[in-house]
């Protein structure tokens, strides 16, 4: 059996909080991604470091927590290009990315927060690349 939580599971009544990932949460992020059925190597922080160092794209990683437990993760990068302007992408130079969540509420909250950031930053588009089609997501999609 796969352990999905990175800390003792909080009761469902604990509030869901979405925030930007900080260095204090790096180990918990990678542990969550490795244990989640939809996590991929492109969700891990090693990919973040590679993209940030090689291409200089600004990472913006969102984490959903219920109590001390991570219940969702969304790696994003702000891409600036003279050809396409500013975009949010999860994740660049990879075929998969998007939201990894063990709760539908967490997935919806992460998408809502990412959309809020996209509007505030006035990006041209936000692209989430999924390995598995997200459940209950009514956002526009295209298949590769």
Image: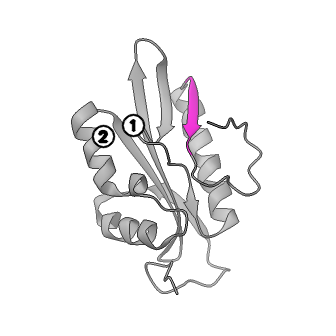
Does residue 132 lie above or below 12 as drawn? above
Residue 42 percent location from the top left of the image: 40, 51
Q: Which mark is residue 93?
A: 1
Q: Residues within 10 Å of mark 1 (few under 14, many from 20)?
A: few
- At horizontal 28% and vertical 54% (from top left) the residue drawn is 46
For the stretch drawn in magenta, what is the main secondary structure? strand
The answer to whether mark 1 and mark 2 are in CB contact below 8 A is yes
Return the mark for residue 85: none
- Classify residue 134 by image quadrant: bottom right
Residue shown at the point (42%, 69%) measured from the top left: 34
Q: Is residue 73 above or below residue 125?
A: below
For the C terminus, the quadrant is: top right
Q: Residue at x 39, y 57 (%)?
A: 41
Q: How many numbered discs? A: 2
Tell which of 9 and 91 is nearer to you.
Answer: 91
Tell me the residue that label 2 is attached to: 51
User: Where residue 65 sits: x, y (%)?
Assistant: 52, 68
In the image, 95 versus 75, the foreground residue is 95
Task: Name the spot of residue 137 as percent of width and height, x first.
Answer: 74, 50
User: Magenta stretch: residue 128 in it?
Assistant: yes
Q: Nearer the viewer, mark 1 or mark 2?
A: 1
* Residue 9 sits in quarter: bottom right
Secondary structure type for disc 2:
helix
Q: Residue 93: x percent and y percent? A: 39, 37
State the separation of the CA atoms marked 1 and 2.
8 Å
- Residue at the front extreme, as displayed: 144
Above-or-below relation of 127 to 112 = above
Residues rendered magenta in the picture: 124-129
């Amino acid at each position: 059996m796969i352990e999905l939580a990175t800390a003792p599971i909080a009761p469902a009544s604990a509030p869901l909080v979405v925030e930007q990932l900080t260095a204090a949460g790096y180990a918990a992020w990678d542990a969550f991604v490795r244990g989640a059925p939809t996590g991929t190597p492109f969700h891990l922080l090693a990919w973040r470091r590679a993209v940030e160092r090689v291409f200089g794209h600004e990472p913006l990683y969102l984490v959903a927590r219920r109590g001390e437990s991570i219940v969702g993760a969304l790696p994003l990068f702000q891409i600036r290009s003279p050809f396409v302007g500013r975009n949010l992408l999860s994740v660049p130079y990879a075929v998969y990315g998007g939201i990894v969540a063990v709760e539908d509420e967490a997935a919806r909250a992460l998408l809502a927060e990412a959309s809020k950031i996209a509007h505030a930053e006035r990006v041209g588009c936000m692209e989430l690349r999924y390995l598995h089609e997200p459940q209950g997501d009514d956002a526009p999609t295209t298949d590769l």
